[in-house]
Image (cartoon, coloured by chain):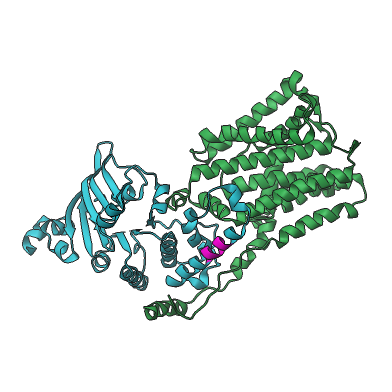
Chain colours: A green, B cyan
Amino acid sequence: MAHSRHIEAPRAPTLLPVAVFIALGALLPLLLSSGFHVRLAMLIWIYAILCMGFNLLYGFTGQISLGLPAFYAIGAYGFGMLQTMLGFPPLLAFAGTLAIVALLSLLIGLPLLRLRTHYLAMATLAFMLIQNGVANRWIGFTGGQSGIAVPPLEWAGETLGRTEIYYVVLVMASLTLLLHDFLIRSHIGRAMQAIRDDETAAQALGIRVTRYKLRILVVSGVLAGVAGVCFGITSLRVDPSLSEFHVLVSVLTIVVMGGLGTRFGPIVGSVIVVLLPQFLTSFGAFETVIYGVFILVFLLFMPHGLSGLFERRRWSLRRRSSPQADAQAREMRRSAE
Amino acid sequence: MTVERNSGPLLRLENVVQKFGGLVAVNNVSFEIRKGEVKGLIGPNGAGKSTTFDLVTGVRPPTSGEIHFNGIRVTRQPAHTRSPMGMARTFQIVRLFRGLSVLENVQMGMHPAFPDGLLPSILRSAERRRQEAESRKRAMKLLDFVGLADRAGERIETLTLGQLRLVDIARALASGPDLLMLDEPAAGLNDAETRNLAEMLALLKKRGMSMLLVEHDIDFIMSACDTVVVMDHGTKIADGTPAEVSRNREVIAAYIGRRAADVTV
């Protein structure tokens, strides 16, 4: 193959857009005047963390866990309860919470991931119903309907203000974004997509399919836990509504609108899903209808979501090769001998 | 171990049997592939070639019998262990990864060479970046070899069937295999594509690549292979050079019919 022709490999994506998203996030509090807006911004990042986990698992690896809201809720409950009941300091409570969600994901995934996808979907959904039932009914432990209080974060004896808490959430979201991005741009990301597209071929290429699925399930559970902790420190209260169906619907809407299996779909989707209802309130009774129509339009006309629109464009712009190019390549091989 | 590796055949099947309930799909089949040999596996529909191929590639373990590769017993080793050992395969139905670019599909062939752990994979050390760059370069070379370097950044769905087969071969070659196993590589190709494929396999053979070729196209296999195993009704009926095999009474009978065999011989 020692011929003179040099075709360079297409460029690999860079970290630049990730830096842009984080920088925008860091500047945001300077632009927002009211506390309500800062709260919305925090909610966007929290949903983005939750949905990046879902994106890794479903968008990239092709495994559906419908029980993600349960891990989200356990993250928030765990972080509060480890502090109030066992007296853990916040950092230790954070680590302990993540250990709990990781362990639970592992226990659920171990028996299920050898089976095909819908078993995982059903079993995790059942897990969510159980978790929600416990949160609602075991009043002595979880506080029932009214939930539990999460101690406010403190620094040097003083309670953190809203903007400071925003930055804590932003740091979590940035770390998640970096993890999400490094994973999908590494050979692991390629292997995940290989598993999603064709398990048999993935196996034949030496990929340990079940092991990868299990790892990503745990990662998605842990990220849901991180999102839950962030929810806890922003709202200072956790109740069973965290693992109700509307959260699952939001997660699905975000990944579909943002773009399944894209680098920035979860963030773009979160911005839309959190902000859109704010703009639609002026439509009064029609709010839900318009919201639903929006989702339908996205499904019909943008199957790869908003983020996919930009990320996939470069593929279609490449020129196609001609019969001459094929013949040329054959000639080249012959002369290479 | 090294002595055994160097002296013995690359692949050895010993009395391999595969039963599906009452049906014996593969009945006591034995054959060997030496280093540098291109072995064809042919037979009429339902002869058991695809099942034999599945056993060799580890899709399922045989009911009985043994399979050795490079002197190591691989009979019951699962499919994912074969690529790191030096066995690479292609698929009859194209099984490329739709979500990945052409280049990334070829890079997947090198997956076992990358570290397995999540943390070492995402912490982009200098070593990891070097490995990734190396892998891209190697994948480009392989795409260049199959004549598709200019399509490296495209998505799989923009390629023709003939081109998809070539990407599949490039992906299999990416693991640096000792044995390349091709499952009906010429199926569905037009004449020009088939000629292109035959040229490429001849070039690989010239470079010393050992191959196992399952094929329907008799002309293709007779010109491409050093030796041919013929199967019929799950049993091996002939094993030899294309010239020997094509004179074999049983082979003619299996392909054309008993009476024709009597007339010809």
Residue A288, image x, y percentages: 77, 43
Q: Main secondary structure of the magenta part?
A: helix
Task: Specify whether B141 is left or right of A245.
Answer: left
Viewer-closest of B61 and B122: B122
Task: Specify whether A176 is left or right of A150.
Answer: left
Task: Specify whether A29 is left or right of A137.
Answer: right
Question: Which quadrant is home to the C terminus of chain B?
Answer: bottom left
- Residue B131: within the magenta? yes
Task: For residue A76, say whether it is visible.
Answer: no
Task: Give the vertical position of A259 relative to A111 (above or below).
Answer: below
Which segment did they paint magenta? Answer: B130-136
Task: Give the vertical position of A120 relative to A334 (above or below).
Answer: above
Task: Give the vertical position of A198 relative to A331 (above or below).
Answer: above
Q: As drawn, which residue projects farthest toward the right?
A: A33
Find residue A101 and report its image quarter. Answer: top right
Task: Give the vertical position of A179 relative to B208 (above or below).
Answer: above
Find residue B229 and report its image quarter. Answer: bottom left
Viewer-closest of A219 and A231: A219
Q: As drawn, which residue projects farthest toward the top?
A: A140
Residue A277, image x, y percentages: 80, 46
Task: Specify whether B20 is left or right of B160.
Answer: left
Residue B36, image x, y percentages: 28, 64
Residue A113, image x, y percentages: 52, 38
* Residue in view at x 45 percent, y 79 percent: A3
Task: For residue A71, say whether it is visible.
Answer: yes
- Residue B215: within the magenta? no
Q: State how many labels appear.
A: 0
* Residue in view at x 70 percent, y 43 percent: A50
